[in-house]
Image: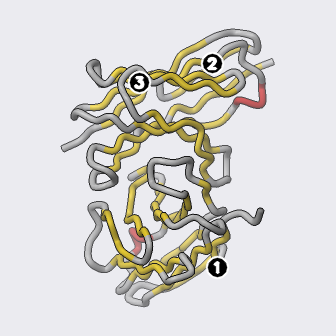
Amino acid sequence: KAGVTQTPRYLIKTRGQQVTLSCSPISGHRSVSWYQQTPGQGLQFLFEYFSETQRNKGNFPGRFSGRQFSNSRSEMNVSTLELGDSALYLCASSIELTDTQYFGPGTRLTVL
Amino acid sequence: ELKVEQNPLFLSMQEGKNYTIYCNYSTTSDRLYWYRQDPGKSLESLFVLLSNGAVKQEGRLMASLDTKARLSTLHITAAVHDLSATYFCAVDTYYGQNFVFGPGTRLSVLP
């Protein structure tokens, strides 16, 4: 059974640019969650999608958005990048949010 | 505002010893999650605790939840070096609408 994949694994952008990260969940998993991890703020919940609908959203500005496609693959987008957006972005999939989550390897974003 | 605390933040222990990591949270919740993260790696889900009194065990790790005390514990039995990692708890107060992580406990198991 293939695991959760995230692309790209590493990304370098400059301030003001936008970025799109992709997450392919485990087959059959309809819940996809996104998290941001930074040394300063720790782990923070971004949002969760289930069957193409955003069910939950963390406390992030509107520059952070996402979507989920009919095959459960999900993308998150960050517009007008700021230095503070430099982080490890993790994606997790599960059958339901309250089930065991399986995490991808993460995308490390560096904003210069 | 939901706050999640973990104690201790750093833990150095010898192989074969037992220890407990504590996770306290500030708002009523009945969903608590434990994760493990190895250095430079992604997260691994350990336990999902969904009700008061829930207890789950996997190998040398056992997690429990007391929603009345707003406390979860992660107990380590007869620690081995492979358990060295950072352990996070997370609390969800309303099905993901307020999902907050603790700061993590960095565990180092020494031979």
Task: Single out the mark in the foreground, 1 or 3.
Answer: 3
- Do the dots labelled 1 and 3 sit on one chain? no
- The reply to whether residue A112 is in sight is no
Q: Specify the subunit that label 2 lies on.
A: B
The residue nearer to you, when weighing A85 against A95, is A95
How far is mark 1 from mark 2, CA to CA?
Answer: 36 Å
Task: Report x, y in % for residue A53.
Answer: 36, 75
Judge whether A57 appears above or below A98 on screen: below
- Asked if the residue under mark 3 is in contact with the one under mark 1, i.e. CB atoms within 8 Å, the reply is no
- Say which residue label 1 marks: A8
Task: Specify whether B51 is left or right of A107.
Answer: left
How far is mark 2 from mark 3, CA to CA?
Answer: 15 Å
Tell me the residue at 33%/34% (across/down).
B30
Judged from the image, the secondary structure of the residue bearing numbered disc 1 is loop
Crowding near the residue tagged with mark 1, few <14, some 14–19, many ≥20 C-alpha atoms within 10 Å:
some
Tell me the residue at 34%/26% (across/down).
B24
Judged from the image, the secondary structure of the residue bearing numbered disc 2 is strand
Q: Specify the subunit that label 1 lies on.
A: A
Q: Which mark is on residue B65?
A: 3
Compare marks 2 and 3 and give the one earlier in the sequence. Answer: 3
Q: Which mark is on residue B76?
A: 2
- The reply to whether residue A2 is in sight is yes
Report the amino acid beneath label 1.
Pro
- Asked if the residue under mark 2 is in contact with the one under mark 1, i.e. CB atoms within 8 Å, the reply is no
Report the amino acid beneath label 2.
Ile
Tell me the residue at 59%/69% (across/down).
A108
Task: Report x, y in % for residue A78.
Answer: 40, 81
